[in-house]
Image (cartoon, coloured by chain):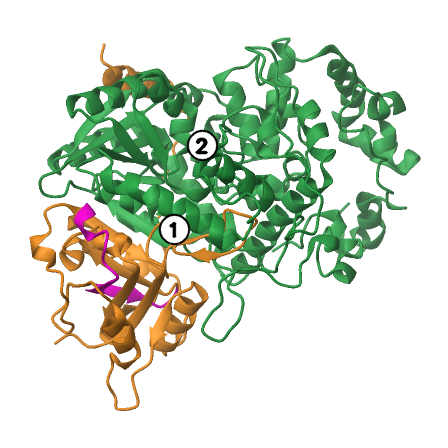
Chain colours: A orange, B green
Amino acid sequence: MSARDGILRAIRQNRPSGTYALPPLPDFAPLVGDDLIASFGERLERMGGRLAQAGPDGDPLGAVRERLAGARVVASAVPEVAGNRDLARVAHPADLADVDVAVVRAVFGVAETGSVLFTQDELRVNAVAYLAQHLIVLLDPADLLVNIQAAYRRPEFGRSAYAVLHTGPSATADIEGVLIHGAQGVRSLTVVLLART
Amino acid sequence: MSAPDDLRIHDGAADRGGLIHPEIRQPDDESERGPDGSRLQHAEGTTQPLSAAPKAAQAREPQPRGARIRGNRPIDQAEAAERFIAAPLHLKAHDERLWDLRKKRDAVAHTIPEWEELRELASQIKAHTLTNLDAYLEQFEAQAKANGVHVHWAADGAEHNRIVHGILTDHGARTLIKSKSMLTEECGFRHYMDAHGIEIIETDLGERIQQLDKEEPSHVVCPAVHKTRLDVAEVFARTLGTDPENDDIHYLAESQRETTRPYILTADAGMTGCNFAIAETGTVVTCTNEGNADLSGNVPKLQIHSIGIEKLIPRVEHLGVFIRLLSRSALGSPITQYTSHFRAPRAGTEMHMVLVDNGRSARLGMEAFWTSLKCIRCGACMNTCPVYRRSGGLSYGATYSGPIGLIIDPTFNKRKYSTLPFSSTMNGSCTNVCPVKINIHEQIFAWRKVLAEEHEIPLVKKGMMKAAGQVLSRPAAYRAAIGAADSALRVLPRFAVYNPLNTWGRGREMPETPRQSFHAWYKQNRAKTDGAA
């Protein structure tokens, strides 16, 4: 008998008695106020991320221009920012090891947690969101969802090869509880509010 | 919600800044700060600077090591715990750090009005899935195959290791980067691959520290929580060539990042564990703070996900319950930095999923213990457990430590882990914090009974249980005895409590007991007005 059949047979033989129905999920009231942007920003910053404020001239990218200008290698997956590393021509993800800043657009944001969602379509090369030193995320304020429950009703999870919620940057506190950003992935994550064009 | 159930919190803790060991509070530490300059405390970060080994301030204290493993002989957890207690710097840091996580968990849970409802839903979803596990596994398999994933089934850890070795051999793979997985610890995966010439690199910082020190993880979420910065500096100096005098935590973490990155870039294969497997979509979900699971799954051309069969949940929408509970219960953080959903291979790569039983289907048939399969490995029961906090995870000499370990480990080996269900004060705090409402302390008690019936209990413990059992088994006699003796503890024969062989009476006096028992107080004050006796 194959391992598969053996396991399934054992599960059937050992099924606990009683019937346990799958409970319906209630609609939980959102735990954020009407100002989703304020809630999102506050929670994102508590999770170690940054919400970029528009520059004095109203330039939404004002807060990240300096970082972009100082970067040697910029991999951009968005039309709003010009990079110098073409993600369409990456032969192997490891070739992105020298990326200083990656710029990607989020599918949506979650106000309850300060999270943003990407799929393989936004990232172009999934690994860029981890191998880059810093990540800049464009988010349309109209794409903010109230909570995680709302997020998991979105179709992206059922159809994407890869979908990932990022909440702030890579972090660890595995040594004495001291919090360090950039454990293994990006050292910073900055969200720029910018409507889709 | 209940008040903190650790008695010391009522014992002048407020005067000590809420700390158990106020002497380890530091004026500051290297933790990251937010835009307003405030100290951040997400992920596993502490709420305030805590260290029993601040820079250059303390004499070095050798790290206490775990239980001595002697083949199949019963683990002497108490002996290892005694060595842990004899290392006060380590003990205090460990105790305080985990209690801090417990307090963070409470604080964040209290901000969610539906917290208790979420726990109940999570428990019911798991009960439903486990009692229909065959159908959900078949659905998961069919979906994963339709997504282009290779699905394998492993009856036990050895078969898991053979299957993965076979996949690696087929691809000529010699190096594998992986993220933390308790399942692969269970399978002895690293040791097996070592023996077969495959290089395994753990990419979680805590797990990497443990791998380099040739120790098992001591905690399901914080694998190196029992080590101080000085211990880590020593391990990294010895294995990575770092400066042994530099115990700055940014330096240590950065050294690990810099030395691991080349492996990530060149590894032939990547592996992750699995927090949740979704039957409806064939998706593997991982929850990490470092992003290392995403590197393991997204950089090498070959990716493998090892899945315990109890990780199944029916639908994507159920993540809306579990994701809200997991990190809050584990760390008091609203979510992990990364919640990753792996469903199908990237173009030009191969994706494998290995469904592993390793005793789970047998556990399903154990009437008193099958609900332990609901466990989502958050570690909340460990953080709250007074025995765990003062003995360290390695003292259990098993893959799973703390309260959940006490009820899982004996299912793997009844003799070797026969003593573990006695490493509990039966205070029930573990049950109170469990996000999927496993009745952990009742299962601990049930294991004691099973082990007694199967003659796996040492003689001394049997005698004590008999004496206590006379009284404890009959509520009326118990109450009468408490009333007469002022203290439940004094119901037990003194020799049973202070007997040199009773490990939990050793080295401590029993606490002062209240003048009046709760039951007597309730009867006197409330029963009259409520009209209930």
Name which residue lies at 86% across and 35% down: B509
Chain part drawn in magenta: A94-112
Q: Point out the image quarter for the C terminus of chain A.
A: bottom left
Give the camera-side residue of B77 and B124: B77
Q: Position of residue B203 (x, y in %)?
A: 37, 40
Q: Position of residue B381 (x, y in %)?
A: 57, 40
Left or right: where A163 falls relative to B309: left
- Asked if residue B2 shows in the view, the reply is yes
In the depicted structure, whether residue B66 falls above or below residue B245: above
Q: Earlier in the sequence, mark 1 or mark 2?
A: 2
- Would you name the residue on which mark 2 appears? B211
Q: Read off the chain for label 2.
A: B
Left or right: where B80 falls relative to A125: right
- The residue carrying pointer 1 sits among few (fewer than 14), some (14 to 19) or many (20 or more) residues within 10 Å by Cα, namely some
Left or right: where B332 falls relative to B78: left
Q: Read off the chain for label 1.
A: B
Name which residue lies at 90% across and 38% down: B486
> What type is the residue that disc 1 sits on?
Ile
In the depicted structure, whether residue B362 falls above or below residue B303: above
- The residue carrying pointer 2 sits among few (fewer than 14), some (14 to 19) or many (20 or more) residues within 10 Å by Cα, namely some
Q: Nearer the viewer, mark 1 or mark 2?
A: 2
Q: CA distance from mark 1 to mark 2?
A: 28 Å
